Image (cartoon, grey):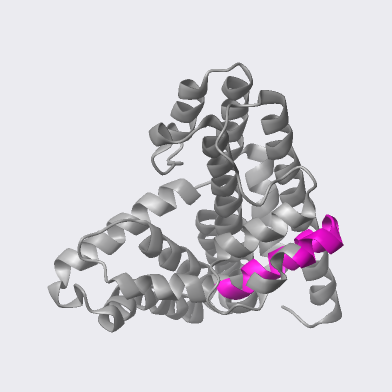
Amino acid sequence: MKFLVLLLTYVVQRKFEMSLSRLHDHWADQFLVFFEGLFPVIRHHTTLYLLIAIFLPALLLFIILSLLENQVFGLATLVVNFLVLFMCLGCGYLKPAVEGYLKHWQNGDASEALNVLQDADIHLDNPENLSAAEVHYQVLCRFMSQTFHRYFMVIFWFMLAGPVGALVARLAHVSAVQPSVYRPQHVKNLGHLLEWIPARLLTFTFALVGNFTGATRQSLSSLIDPYAGADEVLQRGAAGGLDNLPLEVIAGPAQPAKDAAQLVSLRELMNRALVVWLAVLAMLTISGWMG
């Protein structure tokens, strides 16, 4: 049933261009801030923070699913699965943001291109101190990271642990990336732990749908490094899988045609990887290896 829910959610989001993931991120951040204020004891206390702010809502969701099991011929459970995944999966604003960025970037309007990204809550690090080439490279990395965390990471944990897994993955990622004076630094470790396997699976997929030799050569050292973060692993894999994507960027002026080709190639690589994931999950579901 999980694969059917995943397929239904993905089709509905793409067909009607609907996604609540951005709203969910704001809700999740407010939810975490609420618990920080309600339970001061969790401030700067990693274990309590994880238990109360992340695992408690997951436990409540698990209880709800248990109570609804076999109710109305399983329809109630199906609806809850769909709603939770619908909130956690996808990034409906990313596609128009990238298209708007490309349009302004190709027209030479870098400031307006960055405004489009900021309006979509895609923030770069000190873009005013970077060259145009460095800014564009950072955009490529942000696009890849957003797509990974909102699609591949959520899909992995949903198929492995159902809606509870998807919820924990999103809450853990939000707690890791959203700044807070009360949030313990070690909370980020949970996000890194949940990223570890899906990031490496996606990098291997880049090798399958891109340049296999280049992707494996560029990413092998980071793949086997237990401390390498998801962004580093993915950047290396994508740079090796695509002929026109550099591993590192050198300060320089914008090259609109080349820059646009890089972003389009990266988006196509991510799309091909997603098709492979869905095909593999379909085969695992049909064979009975996955529910």
Q: Is residue 142 left or right of residue 261?
A: left
Of 106 and 245, which appears nearest the observer? Answer: 245
- Majority secondary structure in the magenta region: helix
Q: For residue 94, what is the image quadrant?
A: top right
Of 51 and 234, which appears nearest the observer? Answer: 234
Residue 135 in the image: above or below residue 87: above
Boundaries of the magenta span: 196-217
Residue 182 in the image: above or below residue 151: below
Question: Measured from the top left, where is residue 11 in percent x and y?
Answer: 70, 49
The answer to if 178 sits in the magenta stretch is no
Question: Measured from the top left, where is residue 90 in percent x and y?
Answer: 58, 51
Residue 279 in the image: above or below residue 45: above
Question: Measured from the top left, where is residue 15 in percent x and y?
Answer: 69, 40
Of 182 and 157, which appears nearest the observer? Answer: 182
* Residue that appears at 41% across and 53% down: 25
Q: Quadrant of the C terminus?
A: bottom right
Residue 115 in the image: above or below residue 126: above
Whether residue 1 is visible here, answered yes or no, is: no
Question: Measured from the top left, where is residue 252 in percent x and y?
Answer: 57, 32
* Residue that appears at 53% across and 30% down: 132
Whether residue 49 is visible here, answered yes or no, is: yes
Q: For residue 159, what is the image quadrant?
A: bottom right
Q: Is residue 35 left or right of residue 266?
A: left
Q: Quadrant of the N terminus?
A: bottom right
* Residue that appears at 78% across and 49% down: 242
The answer to if 207 sits in the magenta stretch is yes
* Residue that appears at 84% across and 57% down: 209
> How many marks overall?
0
